[in-house]
Amino acid sequence: MNPLRLLDFSWDTVSAGSLFSGVSLPWMSHLTVANLTLGLGLPEQSVLQPAWDYLLQHHQAELRSPLFPVVISVSTYLLLVTLYTLLDLLAPSWPALNSYKLHPDRPVTWDNIWTTLYLTAYNHLVYIFPAAVGQWLWRPPIPLPRDAPTLMSFLLGILGCMVVFDFQFYLWHLLHHRVPWLYRTFHAMHHQYLQPFSLVTQYVSAWELISSGFWTTVDPLLLQCHCLTAWGFMVFTICVSTEDHCGYDFPWSLHRLVPFGLWGGPPKHDAHHRMPGTNFAPFFSHWDWLGGTNMVPTPSKDKYVEEGLKGRKDKGA
Ligand SMILES: [Zn+2]
Ligand SMILES: [Zn+2]
């Protein structure tokens, strides 16, 4: 049975005691009491149900279209890069904003914007758009469940997908740095920018774009998530990857909110672009801790790296 379904079942549908019928353990009664106290133990309507009902009633045809995930992914990405690029253009004449930049002395130029925008448009026109049209032509509209996921299974589903994706991309990323041919052929393009800005997020080869798109699509299916959870994971992944490249360290950034340095965030991914042997994981830090590749950037390390990179061609900002 899918582990997330099991969690959903145990927390939302029945008490823990009835899950293990015939087995009576002291902690189960406490769990049952805790569930009822938290309002999680009865089969109540999900808090997401009204919104899901509204979507089913008014936008069912759009939601069922195989094009829908592509449309939300592309529009989320374009919205975010537009906002960050506006900040990049304002930052040089807005000292308060510029102070949040990881490299306040390196403004993003129009040349940077056009170069990255060109590849983004190329990837979308040549790979993403034809793939979407192919899906639209050959895949039947997906059936939609009547019930919304519970809030708990929605959040746990996104967390589960993140944990799985984090491991998959960590391995992909490590391999594409350790094998010179893979690095040269597929990943070096993304490292042309030593100081990333939002549009660098998808300044990647087609193979990198397809790999991450494949796992983002397949992981919610593997974990048997509700389609709403799958779309939530998709949008969240785009928000995180764009934030990782945005070049800003805002006070509300996730790495400042998640404790114990468990979340990577923009400073660590920025460090990866300058020190490519470090910080391979896309979300969390645990695989980099275990692999000995975790690096928290500090001003002294930055100075050392800047000196080591002297003479290297930096197409970046
Ligand atoms: Zn990057
Ligand atoms: Zn890399």
Image: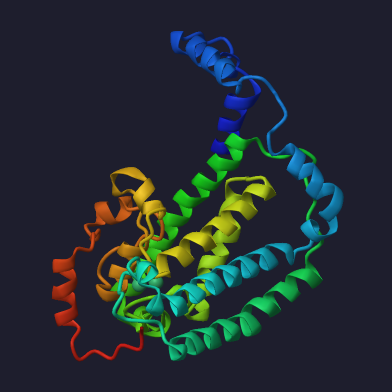
**Vertical relation: 139 (above or below) 177:** above
Determine the image quadrant of residue 88. Answer: bottom left
25 relative to 22 in the view: left or right = left
Q: Quadrant of ligand 2?
A: bottom left
Residue at the location (72% across, 29% down)?
A: 45
| Quadrant in which the C terminus is drawn | bottom left
**Vertical relation: 317 (above or below) 285:** below
| Quadrant in which the N terminus is drawn | top right
Residue at the location (39% across, 68% down)?
A: 97
Picture mark count: 0
Q: How is the image coloured?
A: rainbow
Depth check: 99 or 56 in front? 99
Determine the image quadrant of residue 304. Answer: bottom left
Residue 273 makes an appearance in the image: yes
Residue 277: percent from the left, percent from the top? 25, 70
Depth check: 130 or 312 in front? 312
